[in-house]
Image (tube, coloured by chain):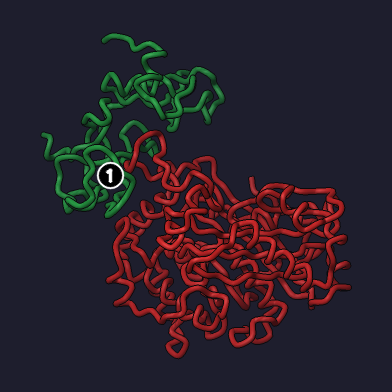
Amino acid sequence: MTTIGDRELVERYTGVALDHTNKDFYRGLLQHELRLSRCAECGWWHHRPKPICPRCWSKDVRATAVSGRGVIHLAIFLHQGPPAPGVDYSAGPHPVVTVELEEQTGLRFTSTVVDAGNVAIVIGTPVELSWIERDGRPFPVFRLRSAAA
Amino acid sequence: MIGRANPVKDRVAFASAATTGFRRDESEATPESLALDACIAAIQAAGLGPAAINGLIGADAEYMQSALGLPHLTYWNGPGIPFLSSVANGVNAVHSGAADVVLAYHSAYRTPIFSRAAANDPFRSMSLGTFGSFAHRGADGFGPDTVTGAVGYTAWASRYLHEYGANREAFGAIAINGRSNALGNPAAVLHDPLTMDDYLSARMIRWPLGLLDMEISVDGADACIITTVERARDLALPPVLVHACTQGMLAQNEEDQSPSLREHGQHVVVESLRAKSDLWLDDVDVLLPYDGFSFIALSWIENLGWCDPGQGAAFIADQWDPAGNRILIGGRVPVNPHGGSLSEGGTQGSGHVREAIHQLQGLCGARQVPGATTALVTTGGFFKNAQGCVLRSDW
């Protein structure tokens, strides 16, 4: 896996507020890995990225790949919303879900669900990470686990 | 840990409050002109003049001092949203002696994002309004695929329906209550009665919340005067004492990381208020829960302990006053008698505070709660801005 340099990273994410704390989260996305912040000392995960562990104050926090498996915790459907490539509100409400990841109770990541009808996108449903392209970049999304099996 | 000390209890008071009233038609107002109108009305209602004001809390205090010609300020600070942040700031300033008489204000202003009439006004095209630029901002560069910001309430509303097997009528009752109350408030922007059918057939925006679950964008402002109880007693109107005032926030304050429906900022506020206040639900004559979204007010009612979690709809049905088509807890306590953010106008809590003050001063005319002496105001939501205060008369 090639490493993406800092300058290339910033250029690929024009308009997004990248900094030294969140850079490895975004660098992971470009390499199709969802890397959330994990304390190398106590093992505690957190999101969004912070320079210290909120549990033990260690500064040894590392962007660490998650399995991407989890369960839908919150689920909403946007009948209108901000424009985004590939999102067509006129075709039907756009799902947005917050997924509780299996790594830790309360560790959650929010994105959309692909390849599923809205009626199947229900709180409590198991999902796994998948990837689409948006704005020319890999974008992390979820897929229902039963459908992906 | 949540502290119990409350040395400011009943030492600081509101001397007055005032509003411009709220509108959503075309207007040449600016956020500053609205705030100035409300400030002048609040100063005059207290029987004060500009020289008495030496503390100022709100947006662009420097401009406001200059425009109002307040000769000397010894304390000023930026706005807090919702408005109880500004109130807490002013109360603390008076209690510490940083200022003797504080003027706190807040204006609501429609921007093109939220209002068609505003979009037709070329002078509003550059306005960021009350909320600045964070409205509709796609957090993390994730466009629509986020629950950061106001969307967070929609997201947790979905969880509420899931966990408690509730339906949207639970939120609709809050909207109908607000509208029925607004009918009696000349300052309110909406005066058409609302039915559950109207609510359920309104345009869906972000399921499970639709158009009538969301505060209405308005132009208007509120202002109030905060000073010591002793000083307030010498002024034109009956003082309204700040009995307890708090903010509340949890470590996990990001919208999608909030622990649960039973553990967020509202619970910190409730625990803090219960520790600091001698007055509680049985003492309350008027309840003013924030309703920037209907779901927030429903949550306040549950989290304050009026009923068990998830039982809000049943509680409201039980406390419904058919004659007024509104909530009347125990046949006595109205909820947001001014109409709230949903129907008076979206003021980020300044309307709730102003109404509480006016109710305890006996200034509410036809909607006056007879003999009201205690008000509970809980503004803000779950994540970064929950707040509450108990206000009482100078009995």
Residue A132 location, x and y as percent? 21, 31
Residue B305 location, x and y as percent? 52, 66
Q: Can residue B17 be seen here?
A: yes
| Residue closest to the far front | B122
Q: Chain of mark 1?
A: A
Residue drawn 22% across and 29% down? A133
Q: Quadrant of the C terminus of chain B?
A: bottom right
Residue B270 location, x and y as percent? 58, 59
Please tell me which residue lies in front, B211 or B315.
B211
Q: Is residue B159 left or right of residue B31?
A: left
Residue drawn 29% across and 22% down? A33
Please tell me which residue lies in front, A20 or A66.
A20
Please tell me which residue lies in front, B167 or B323.
B323
Please tell me which residue lies in front, B57 or B8.
B57
Above or below: residue A133 compared with residue B177: above
Above or below: residue B128 compared with residue B234: above
Q: Is residue B211 left or right of residue B53?
A: left
Q: Residues within 10 Å of mark 1 (few under 14, many from 20)?
A: many
Q: Can residue B319 be seen here?
A: no
Q: In the rendered structure, which amino acid carries the disc numbered 1?
A: Ile
Above or below: residue B194 compared with residue A7: below
Q: How many marks?
A: 1
Residue A131 location, x and y as percent? 22, 29
Display colour for chain A? green
Q: Secondary structure at mark 1?
A: strand
| Residue closest to the far top | A2
Please give the letter of the chain rendered in red.
B
Q: Quadrant of the N terminus of chain B?
A: top right
Residue drawn 65% across and 49% down? B2
Q: Which residue is mark 1?
A: A72
Q: Is residue B61 left or right of residue B22?
A: right
